[in-house]
Image: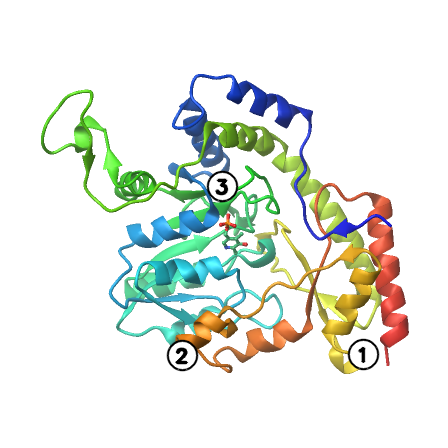
């Protein structure tokens, strides 16, 4: 039986050709294809500057560094995210503070952000969960009022729009991060990017990506000469290769088609779930253009005789590789050891018990979707009250 994955990359012959060309070019890394990838993503998103790095996690890390997080600064983020959003705060010596999610769309709730702001709050990392942009207008109002920096985690939301502006355009965020991991909208294998409109942040991010080193003559303080470089901050090797950027450029050309395919699949799922009482998809606000990274349903456990665990196992037995996004970050053992306890975000905890992610990626055929829908119907027939 063919397995249907919840997410996977879509690679075609144009991608292979682009990578092959890059492999035969003069620079495998730190060459012109990196600049070209940065320019094309920045143009697509409407951002002034882009810094490519080797993962979305690295992007979050240097964004937090550039924001000056440290020394116990509090940074507010969502518990309903991949651990990287919050880990990046810890890398810098900051303190993650979790704001609960909204009931209907599982996105971070601005009113809970507001409740959790203290004198020590320095930044907010809203997450565009599943491809649905966070309530950035409300978050920006709070940030302006309290002097907070906004780092938007848009790892799920490349191609989404919020109130008419493209995610990444910087209208509502100081920095926006993207991921090009294989399950995301476009891939470079591993990879990520920070987008910003602030030239100072851009220059700092570029340095932090490569050991804190610059060769830019305008930024050197001491000697001059072609051999000369200066290390003025403690950065990392977070560089993305030209090989990967060649794949990224080729993938980006297909993003509009990928998004269209995702929306078509979502329409079919939505039609089905409009008719069943046993689960419901997440809501979407009318002012967003959803990028549909994930298709999450919430099981109506009060109408089912079993828990999410049993439903999950039934799908997997049928070869449908459903998933769960996400375990509340603060319930991870590492976070528990830091003192985080159950009950911080009751909404995210309840959501976690009911959530299930169905397969959604451009490579799914009509027959695949039919199979997911028919298995779903059978599971509900078997366990529905
Ligand atoms: C994938 C992801 C990241 C991290 O990206 P990597 O490229 O895997 O390091 C961060 N935040 C969210 C919400 C993600 O889904």
Query: Residue 13 lies in what quarter of the image?
Result: top right
Is 102 placed left or right of 319 in the picture? left
Q: In the rendering, at what x and y percent does residue 280 appear?
A: 74, 68
**Discs 2/1, front:** 2
Label 1: element kind: loop
Query: Residue 76 lies in what quarter of the image?
Result: bottom left
Kindly tell me whether residue 125 is visible in this rendering.
no
Query: Residue 382 lies in what quarter of the image?
Result: bottom right
283 or 194, which is in the foreground? 194
Kindly tell me whether residue 239 is visible in this rendering.
yes
Is 91 placed left or right of 384 in the picture? left
Q: Could you give the CA–CA distance between mark 2 and mark 3, rounded to whole angstroms?
A: 32 Å
- Numbered mark located on residue 339 in the image: 2
Q: Which residue is mark 3?
A: 191
Label 2: element kind: loop
Q: In the rendering, at what x and y percent does residue 336 appear?
A: 45, 76
Classify 207 as above or below 279.
Answer: above
Classify 319 as above or below 16.
Answer: below
Classify 334 as above or below 316.
Answer: below
Q: Could you give the CA–CA distance between mark 3 and mark 1, rounded to whole angstroms?
A: 40 Å
Label 3 CB-ligand 1 distance < 8 A: yes
């Amino acid at each position: 039986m063919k397995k249907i994955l919840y997410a996977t990359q879509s690679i075609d012959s144009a991608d292979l050709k682009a990578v092959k060309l890059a492999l035969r070019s003069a620079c495998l890394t730190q060459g012109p294809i990196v600049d070209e990838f940065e320019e094309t993503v920045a143009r697509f998103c409407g951002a002034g500057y882009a810094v490519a790095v080797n993962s979305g996690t690295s992007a979050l890390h240097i964004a937090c560094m550039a924001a000056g997080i440290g020394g116990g600064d509090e940074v507010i983020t969502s518990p309903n995210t991949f651990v990287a959003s919050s880990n990046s705060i810890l890398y810098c010596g900051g303190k993650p503070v979790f704001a609960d999610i909204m009931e209907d769309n599982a996105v971070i709730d601005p009113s809970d952000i507001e409740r959790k702001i203290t004198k020590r709050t320095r930044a907010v990392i809203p997450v565009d969960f599943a491809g649905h942009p966070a309530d950035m207008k409300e978050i920006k109002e709070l940030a302006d009022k309290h002097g907070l920096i906004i780092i938007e985690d848009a790892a799920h939301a490349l191609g989404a729009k919020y109130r008419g502006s493209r995610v990444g355009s910087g209208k509502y965020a100081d920095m926006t991060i993207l991921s090009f991991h294989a399950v995301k909208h476009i891939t470079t294998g591993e990879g990520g990017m920070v987008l910003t409109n602030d030239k100072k942040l851009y220059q700092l991010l570029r340095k932090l990506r490569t050991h804190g080193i610059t060769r830019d003559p305008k930024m050197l303080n001491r000697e001059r000469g072609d051999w000369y470089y200066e290390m003025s901050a403690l950065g990392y090797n977070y560089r993305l290769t030209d090989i990967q950027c060649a794949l990224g450029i080729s993938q980006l050309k297909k993003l509009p088609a990928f998004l269209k395919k995702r929306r078509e699949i979502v329409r079919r799922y939505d039609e089905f779930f409009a008719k069943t009482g046993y689960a419901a998809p997440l809501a979407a606000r009318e002012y967003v253009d959803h990028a549909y990274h994930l298709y999450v349903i919430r099981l109506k456990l009060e109408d089912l005789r079993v828990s999410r665990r049993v439903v999950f196992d039934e799908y997997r037995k049928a070869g449908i590789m459903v998933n769960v996004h996400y375990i509340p970050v603060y319930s991870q053992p590492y976070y528990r050891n830091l003192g985080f306890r159950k009950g911080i975000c009751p909404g995210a905890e309840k959501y976690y018990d009911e959530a299930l992610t169905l397969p959604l990626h451009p490579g799914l055929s009509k027959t695949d979707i039919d199979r997911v829908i028919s298995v779903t119907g059978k599971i509900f027939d078997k366990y529905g009250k």
